[in-house]
Amino acid sequence: QWVYNILEKKAEADRIVHENPDPSNGFVLVPDLKWNQNQLEDLYLIALVHRRDIKSLRDLTAEHLPLLRNVLQEGKEAIVKRFGVPSSQLRIYLHYQPSYYHLHVHFTALGYDAPGSSVERAHLLADVIDNLAMDSMYYQKRALTFPLRADEPLFKKFQEAGKV
């Protein structure tokens, strides 16, 4: 609901850094709640797509390339315009598994060791775009590894199934 409240401007409307209102290829860029916006060393923003039918990386196909390219290009432009941070100093990625199932993209300062920015969980948006351009069904076919904490419900499911 938090995501929908932002997209519908019922919450955090004053925090929006950039918005592309297109219902298919648009998104809202907002500072992540973990970032206090005082220093650029730990810059952290989230792009929330307007589409509600894309839950995670697994749902993406070549059909979504215009959306993903918009997020990448417009997100970088908005960050350099607002914060003066060039795209060469950004890490732009999606999580798998995500913490919530509404497609969103993380924009963090390259030098910031953000939670979940490690290779086991983060998939660079530029790589995602390239992979989908090569194979529309890449993320439906590819095995994706990801870390789980011992206290996570999904880990317990794997244990019960004898997969751990």
Image: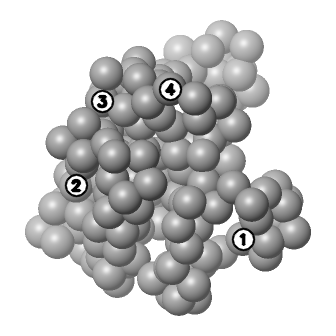
Figure coloring: one colour
Residue 138 coordinates in the image, percent (x, y): 26, 62
C-alpha separation, residue under disc 4 versus residue under disc 2:
26 Å
Measure the alpha-carbon separation of dots 4 and 3: 13 Å
Above or below residue 133? Residue 120 is above
Q: CA distance from mark 2 to mark 1?
A: 24 Å
Badge 2 or badge 1: first in the primary sequence: 1
- Whichever of labels 4 and 3 marks the residue nearer the N terminus, that label is 4
The residue lying furthest to the top in this view is 150
Amino acid carrying label 3: it is Leu
Q: Which residue is mark 3?
A: 110
**Residue type at numbered disc 4:** Gln
The residue under label 1 is 7
Query: Relative to 92, is 163 on the left or the right?
Result: right
Q: Secondary structure at mark 1?
A: helix
In the rendered image, which residue does mark 2 sit on?
126
- Which-is-in-front pick, marks 4 and 2? 4
Label 3: which secondary element: loop
Q: Is residue 160 visible?
A: no
Q: CA distance from mark 3 to mark 2?
A: 15 Å
Q: Which label number is shown at residue 39?
A: 4
Asked if the residue under mark 4 is in contact with the one under mark 1, i.e. CB atoms within 8 Å, the reply is no
**Dots 2, 1 in contact, CB < 8 A:** no
Structural crowding at the residue carrying mark 2, measured as other residues with C-alpha within 10 Å and reported as few (<14), some (14–19) or many (≥20)? some
Q: Residue at x 34, y 46 (%)?
A: 84
* Residue that appears at 22% across and 55% down: 126
First reached walking from the N terminus: tag 1 or tag 4 = 1
**3 or 2: tag closer to the N-terminus:** 3
- Residue at 32% of width from left, 63% of height from top? 77
